[in-house]
Structures are given as C-alpha cells and as structure tokens.
Amino acid sequence: MSEQIINSLLETDLYKFSMGQAIYHQFPSYITTWTFKCRNEDVHFTAEMVEEIRRQIELYCHLTFTEEELEYLSGITWLRGSYVDYLRLWHPRFEDFRIGTDAPCGLTIEADGTWLNTSMYEIPTLAIVNGVYFRMQYDYDKLLESFKERLSDKIRKLTDGTYRIGAFSEFGIRRRLSAEAQELAVRELAEAKLDGSVFVGTSNVYLAKKFGLKPVGTMAHEWIMCVGQGNHKHNPAYSNWYALDAWVKEYGVLNGTALTDAITTDCFLKDFQLTYATLFSGVRQDSGDPIEWGEKMIRHYESLGIDAREKTLLFSDSLDFERAHRIHAHFAGRAKVAFGIGTYVANDTDVPALNIVMKTTACNGQDVAKISDSEGKGMCKNPAYVDYLERCIRWRMEHDV
C-alpha cells in the first residue's frame, strides 16, 4: 500500500490534548515507555506488514500542526495559549520508536522518551497498525462493503427507535478499519434523524473539526498511572488522589470526567470524596460489570449527599448499541447516562476486529501498572511490581485509609 494513513496531527483522541496540556504544565520532565500488544492469539503480522507499519510511522513523524489546526485547538475552552504555542513547535520523533518482529504476533513496537512526546504516539500508532493489517491481510473493498451494510443496519435501528441510548459519542480511531470507514460512520451518524438517541460527537479531533462536531474526551489510564506511580515517593494505592489533585489544579471545574478503574473502582472511591465528587461532572467506566459499577457510583454519590441525577455516568467498555440500550434503560431518570462507542462503530465487518493496545509500561525508570475491574486488561512487564501494587491496594482497602 502507498496511501498515507495519518495525515494530520489532529487525528488522535481529544484526551491526548487534555492530558498533554496538564503534562506540559506539571510533568514536563517525566520519561515514559510505551509498549504495543496484540491480544488476538490467531493474528500474525507478516514481515511486509511490519515494514509498512514502520514506513507509515515515519510518515506520521514528518507531520506538524498547521496554523488552521492550532486556531481550532485555541477555540477549545480549556486549552491555554501556552500549550497551543508549544504544539506549534512540536512534532513526533521517529527516533523515539523501536519497531521489530520478536513477538508471537510478529510485531513489536516500543516508544521511549518524554511523556509529552510518547503520550501522543499511542493513538496514531494503533490506527496505523489497524490500517496496514486490514488492507494487507484481506480484500479491503469487500471488508468496506460489509462495514457499510452493518453501519446502515445500525443507523436504521437508531432511527426507528429499536435502540434508544440517549447521548453517545464515537470513540473508534484506535481500532478503526480505516480513516475512510471512521469518517463515513461519523458523517452518517451526524446526519441521521435519531429517535431516542443523540449523537454528541467524536473523540477524533480531526473529524470533529471537519464536521463541526463536539470533540470529546478527558483522561485515560496513563494519567493516573504516571502521575500516581511515576513519582517514586508516592504510595501507588493513592494514585487516584495524586491524579485527581493535579487535574483540578489544571482545569478546576472544567473538563471533568474522572476515570475510575486504573487501580480498581473500589480504591478510586476512597479518594473520590466530597470535593472531587462535586468538582467533577461525572465518571467513566472502562472495565467490570457496567450495571454493578453504575449502582456503586449512584450509592457513592448518595452517601455524599450529592444528587446522582446531576452527574454523568459515561460507559466506554466494549459497547454495542444493544448493550448501551439496556444500560440506558436501567439507569433512566437516576443519573445522566452517556456512552463512548468505539470498535462497534468504526470496525464492524465480516472479520474480527483486532484487539490491540499500546500502554505505558514504565515511568521515570520504574514499572507502572493498571489493576482494572476486569481480568486481562492490565499490562506490565514486571509481575513483581503488579504484586507490589496489588498488596498496596489491598492493605489500604483492609485498613480503610
């Protein structure tokens, strides 16, 4: 293939800019390592695919922000001029990447460097891997046709009221079939006359700009992991407190959806007490049982004397419209409910989607890890560190501190 996959530095999730500004102002010296992993056991990347992935990443690294793109970012309420000026000078560094074949799936990617740089690489890299794989492994035109057929059926069920899911956004850039497919999905959802559902926007900043939609996204697991575990003096069981505190310093009451499951939701709730629960407009679920999680969050808000109906429960874990419909119906009238839906919108075809991730595995020379509410969603190179983190969390939960 010869077509460039990433053509704009806005082709990433909005939360990369949310976190990027806070990193720029508060943690500019932090150094991180990011590691790629393919969770599909039956997927293999050929040598030709790996070479094309390497070429596409190098092309991405030649991009810079245009003045028009910077002007658009300046229009986002909570982005400051100091950070936008930094982005005017910023571009990806190909020298930060190490790309090889020594893995069961045939592809290894690691990125080392400042957190300011390496955080920005995750989403474009995953989009590149997907784009290369599906064009070189399959008949892409047939895949796109199956994608269009399924998309039409989905939108029909949203327009005729089969599925009523309230507010939802498209979160699919990292696992999309292609830029073409994601753009088609976003455009058709934006133009559709939905019944009982509202398409709010997309996490893809480029597409939000192109179609005049709302760009959506606040924080990812990397924020809690690096802020909470990157400082070696911190007890990692308090990662959420450090991360929430730094976020409020940066944004106050703006841009406030807290991610709950970086080191388990139960541990998160230890720190999500009255001040933070009041300041943050809502919380995001990304692992575990969504109904149990939502009930737990409503009980927590109520225990603090906060009306949960004024708060948003944002669900973003492996959703389709049927699951979102059930969740929305369950919590109707009890809280504001919203959904971030990714692969189901951006890569639903006749073949299975890739289950690929690129995660922070080290910060400032120390291992970092995520202990989510679901088995298998964590990723760490050092089992001893995972054991240490789990023991810290367990001690805190057992001693109620």
Image: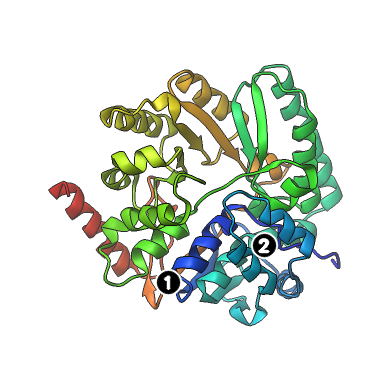
Relative placement, left or right, of 48 versus 78 is right
Q: Residue at x 35, y 44 (%)?
A: 276
Mark 2 residue type: Pro
Q: How many callouts does the rendering have?
A: 2
Q: Residue furthest front?
A: 81
As drawn, the label of residue 362 is 1
Give the image location of residue 11, x and y in percent: 71, 57
As drawn, the label of residue 40 is none
Q: Nearer the viewer, residue 20 or 194?
A: 20
Give the image location of residue 136, x and y in percent: 78, 61
Q: Quadrant of residue 41?
A: bottom right
Answer above or below: position of 52 versus 387. Answer: below
Q: Are marks 1 and 2 in contact (CB under 8 Å)?
A: no
- Residue 347 in view (yes/no): no
Q: Residue at x 75, y 71 (%)?
A: 63
- Residue 95 in view (yes/no): yes
Q: Nearer the viewer, residue 142 or 304?
A: 304
Q: Residue at x 39, y 27 (%)?
A: 308
Q: Residue at x 68, y 74 (%)?
A: 89
Q: How is the image coloured?
A: rainbow
Q: Which residue does the numbered mark 2 point to in the structure image? A: 124
Give the image location of residue 373, x and y in percent: 37, 45
Give the image location of residue 13, x and y in percent: 62, 53
Secondary structure under badge 1?
Answer: strand
Answer above or below: position of 201 versus 165. Answer: below
Q: Nearer the viewer, residue 178 or 100?
A: 178
Relative placement, left or right, of 16 versus 299 is right
Secondary structure under badge 2?
Answer: helix
Mark 1 residue type: Ala
Crowd tier of the residue under label 2, counting other residues whose Cα lies within 10 Å: few below 14, some 14–19, many 20 or above: many
Q: How far apart, in angstroms, are the residues tagged by discs 1 and 2?
A: 20 Å
Crowd tier of the residue under label 1, counting other residues whose Cα lies within 10 Å: few below 14, some 14–19, many 20 or above: many
